[in-house]
Image (cartoon, grey):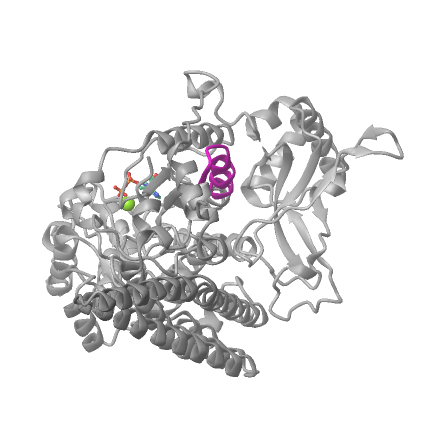
Amino acid sequence: MATLRQKALLLAQNRPSVSATAPSLKISDYFGVNVFGKKQMKESLAPTVYKKVEEAIEKGAKIDPSTAEEIASAVKTWALSKGVTHYTHWFQPLTGSTAEKHDAFFDAHAGIEKFKGSALVQQEPDASSFPNGGIRSTFEARGYTAWDPSSPIFIFSNTLCIPTIFVAYTGEALDYKTPLLKSIEAINDASVAICQLFDRNVRKVTPSLGVEQEYFVIDKALFATRPDLVMAGRSVYGHNPARGQQLEDHYFGSIPTRVKDFMLDFEIEALKLGIPVSTRHNEVAPGQFEVAPLFEEINKAVDHNQLLMDLMDKVAEKHNLKVLFHEKPFAGVNGSGKHNNWSLITDTGVNLFQPSNSARENLQFLTFLVGTIKAVYDYADLLRASIASAGNDHRLGANEAPPAIISVFLGSTLSGILDELEKNGNIKIEKGDNMYMKLGISKIPEIILDNTDRNRTSPFAFTGNKFEFRAVGSNANSAEPMTALNVIVAEVLKQMAKDIEKEISAGKEKKIAIVNVLRKYIKDSKKVRFEGDGYSEEWEKEAEKRGLSNLKSTPFALDTYSDKKVIEIFQKHNVLSHVELHARHEIMLENYIKKVQIESRVMGDLALNHIIPTAILYQNKLIENANGLKGLGLDNTAAIETIKEVSKHLESLKSNVNQMIDARKKLNKEDDIVKRAKGYSTDVKDAFFDKIRYAVDKLELLVDDESWPLVKYREMLFIK
Ligand code: ADP
Ligand code: MG
């Protein structure tokens, strides 16, 4: 009888490809058809009502009940015309995924379809099942969701989805979106103040975000046979395939047909949802792919990334595939990130990170550039914490991934300019001198999007006209790191504005005042700049010498949420109160413990129920063989040696699993959540995961292939 593994392999090998066709050759014919966007609103709302919505979107103005009523009615008509029967508030609780609670438009009492303005604006989902870090005790289940008009309403899975924020009835944020929206205001205020030094016309500055999303794809049946992938999202066992990444080149450019069809399909659906995916499919590791939509205003980009992940998951089902968003689903193979490309754009259409051919604009560019570098230096630990998760711990600081040390890469051109500025800043500028010339600011090449000067090993790199935060985990909600980034840059820009003001009050000319402050900031933040190989051991040593943190484990990285300095900036910029930050810290620790606990259980269960019994059966066969050979008077050394080796790994496996279970039991009695989380990191994960995996992966090489219970790496990674 065939084993589950063999059956799954047979299924996977004989899958037909499921092709997808776009509704039209022209994308513009169907882009955004499933979105109730500005265009649809304009068409269906009275001009006065539309104006109010626009104000709510642009300026965050409140929507009054009668306006809400009219919008609800128009949305309902639009949704019903598209065959939609249900609606839901769509929000991003701290569980890490998106949440929905569906209600029908149909009102059985009235016998008609209804959708009230109040239902559009506010809902009370049963919030007791979402994490709240002690803000809202479970018996008091009143949290509510409130419509966020700045992110458009859309149809997903035949349901009208209304993007909302999620807050406790006492007002504290219980989601990712609320602090993000507040951080957008904070950075807007701080940036506009700086821009005013250069251009009085700037009234608004908005962060932009473009998310490059990496992911793995494997066959659905193979996925289903691996309890570790199902439960923990990553394979806890599996020996490296013989042809792994050493043959990297081999895989570039040849995307398997099934995956290509899947990509095409989800891209079509994404475009219908107004997600501007640009067709780009580079393959990074075997089985790994990437999708990168065009950048958008940050709030929309975050929603679109969350939605895209949901969408990919759903479309994959149709193709009998499973998408893995885990940061390190396969050991020894590249991990997955979610590169957050971030920039600041003014309402006058200027990207503040775009070097230009105008000297004046370049001084502005340098101000924002240096401000950001200083922010990363001052708050590196907060940035690190903002991307900390059990999954990302397997990637950061491990193999084939950016290090857990936060540093900034600028490229040789900019690095040189900052060095010059630092050195030459005290050049005496005489009246009539061209200061820009003298300081070398006038000659920043307008285009430094030089692809040859890219550093793929930097966690935070300047890439020509934007910063790319590459250390973000593939499974993360980008709102978390982007909120942190917005807040820290806002803080430094605010400080900068003050420092410049001080210089001006002391009688310095404005330009000189700015340059003086820049010089100081460049000097102060120099240690965070690194142009070399971030994956190297030398960098770890060098970073230590420089006093930069290298926090490899989540619960330790999260300690910074209790730092006075961090509590203060979140409070000062009105993004998170102390209570909210504390709650978040607890939720992150809770999530971490749960994840490691699950991994540890899966490891134990697989070892005890699958691996050990299989290895013992094989061992028995070997014993029979050894005895048989001996009976015939033949040499049985090979059989005896294999028996010994299998025994050795079996012993180690059994004993380590038992010890790991004991370690867990002991930790579960620990009441202090910080200590418990740290214990899970050191006493469970660090102490046992590698040892246990080592024994299992060795056994995989010893036990005959036929009876091995788990689908192997080579079978999962090389999809047909
Ligand atoms: P790279 O080669 O630097 O990774 P890509 O052109 O592939 O550049 O872009 C990566 C992502 O960065 C895309 O999502 C793109 O839309 C986004 N991006 C480009 N310019 C900006 C910008 N000014 N602000 C934010 N994101 C941007
Ligand atoms: Mg990139």
Vertical side of 630 occupied by 707: above or below:
above
Give the percent coordinates (x, y) of residue 503: 29, 66
Give the extent of the magenta segment.
307-321
Vertical side of 570 occupied by 235: above or below:
above
Which residue is more in the foreground, 175 or 100?
100
On the question of residue 428 being in view, the answer is no
Q: Is residue 1 magenta?
A: no
Quarter of the image where one finds residue 393: bottom left
Give the percent coordinates (x, y) of residue 410: 20, 54
The residue at 37%/70% (across/down) is: 689
Which residue is more in the foreground, 266 or 292?
266
Which residue is more in the foreground, 66 or 443?
66
- Relative placement, left or right, of 214 versus 58 is left
Vertical side of 73 occupied by 506: above or below:
below
Quarter of the image where one finds residue 530: bottom left
The residue at 69%/33% (across/down) is: 71
